[in-house]
Image: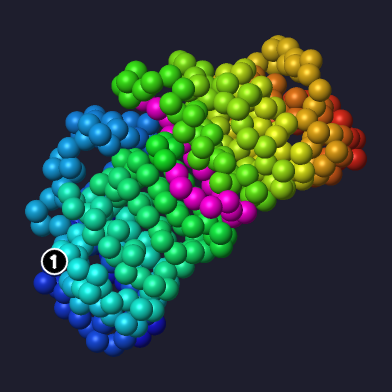
Amino acid sequence: MHGYGVGAPGRISLDSCAVDQWLSYALAHGVQELRLQTSTRQHDMICPLCRGRDIGNGRDYSDSDNASDEEDDQCPNTYVVPAKLLSCANLRSVHLVSCSLPPLHLPSSIHLPSLETLALSNITYSSASASIQRLITACPGLADLTLEACRQIKDITVDRRIGSFALRCCHRVRRVTIDLSETRVFEYLGQPPKALRASRSSAATRLESPQPRSTSAAGRAPGRSTSSLVGFLLPFVNATHLHLGWPDVTKNPLSDYDDFFTLQFPRFPNLTRLELGSRCAHPRAVDAVAGILRQTPNLTALSLKLGNHESSYGAYSPRFAVDVPDVPAAQCLRERVREMSVELYEAANVQRMLLKTLLHGALVLQSLRLVFASGCYCELDALTDEIKSLLANPATTINIF
């Protein structure tokens, strides 16, 4: 049997005895790929911090030192994966969602010699961190690893070279140790850990930091986020492809991220493709993007995701004078950027400032792709004409959606 999946429909939890029987059948027939999701109740609330809202009691899950493990224990009827699943020699891929692992006190309790892909989502009971670490360590052929919304993880070590690693929404993580010398793709969503021990990597890298809530930001020491972020980025300065997202902060615009992007952002000499994700709601965001571009001299393709699918053009004002800062355009804009994509463009005045700054400096731009956010389409003609007038290179091909 090649693949087998068990999933709970809607918000219904599956019967444990039935799941045991289904898994026994699959394992007896030599299943190679297995996905198991026995409940969607906790998975519906996969990441309260990154969604920028409080769940349940409103606690800040990014503060691992002040969090109680017992508060995040799964409900008593959470399905416990049978031990025989972790000793199946045929398994090559396993994805577990909202389950509990059995007690893994000894490495000998795990025998997965063929396992190449492991994905664990919402494994949050109190002893999950130690069990997950033992499971990772006991898989000699592991090549692709994903850990998602496992809030009990505080320290994670990947003691072998791995091709793909994703760590999403594990907001209590403090230390990450990993060999990135052969990693092709690295993805991290969450506040930077306090310590990252990693070799230099040229992996395609995706880094996103969630929007800090006022309750958690008040207790955070000034500069802590940016100092952690500098150290977190350094292993990836040889990357050729980077996706970077940062908070959309309006009441405290960009906060510490402002100085970081304009003054502290490390140099990426080999970067050729850059994707930036932020709504850019404050004028200082224009300086932040300019600061990033100054540190990417060989960039050839730039992609911006500025809004969201529920946006409208309410902030657009045709009477607003869009001024370009009196600063030289980044070297990559003047000499190398040939492709530019702007998605979910809301035409807010700050976004218009940013687009004008970029297009005025893009002297060799060949292709511009612009996707408007949903909203008042009666203004599209005026906005399209404005964008065409901003182009420094009249030969640029424009595709507007």
As helix, strand or loop, the secondary structure at mark 1 comes to loop
Camera sees residue 369: no
> Going 32% across and 55% down the picture, which residue do you hit?
121
Say whether residue 203 is magenta.
yes
Res 222 → quadrant:
top left
Camera-side residue of 175 and 23: 175
> Which residues are the magenta region?
196-213
> Going 13% across and 43% down the picture, which residue do you hit?
70
Q: Residue 277, how many percent across, how many down?
A: 57, 37
Q: Residue furthest bottom?
A: 29
**In-image side of 136 versus 312 (left or right):** left
Q: Which residue is mark 1?
A: 15
Camera-side residue of 136 and 366: 136
Camera-side residue of 253 and 239: 239
Q: Is residue 212 above or below residue 50?
A: above
Res 345 → quadrant:
top right
Q: Residue 162, how many percent across, how many down?
A: 48, 63
Camera-side residue of 257 and 284: 257
Q: Is residue 61 above or below residue 11?
A: above
Amino acid type at circle 1 is Asp
Q: How is the image coloured?
A: rainbow
> Going 49% across and 29% down the picture, which residue do you hit?
227
**In-image side of 191 versus 355 (left or right):** left
> Going 28% across and 80% down the picture, which residue do you hit?
88
Quadrant of image for the N terminus: bottom left
**In-image side of 260 versus 157 (left or right):** right
Q: Is residue 265 above or below residue 253?
A: below
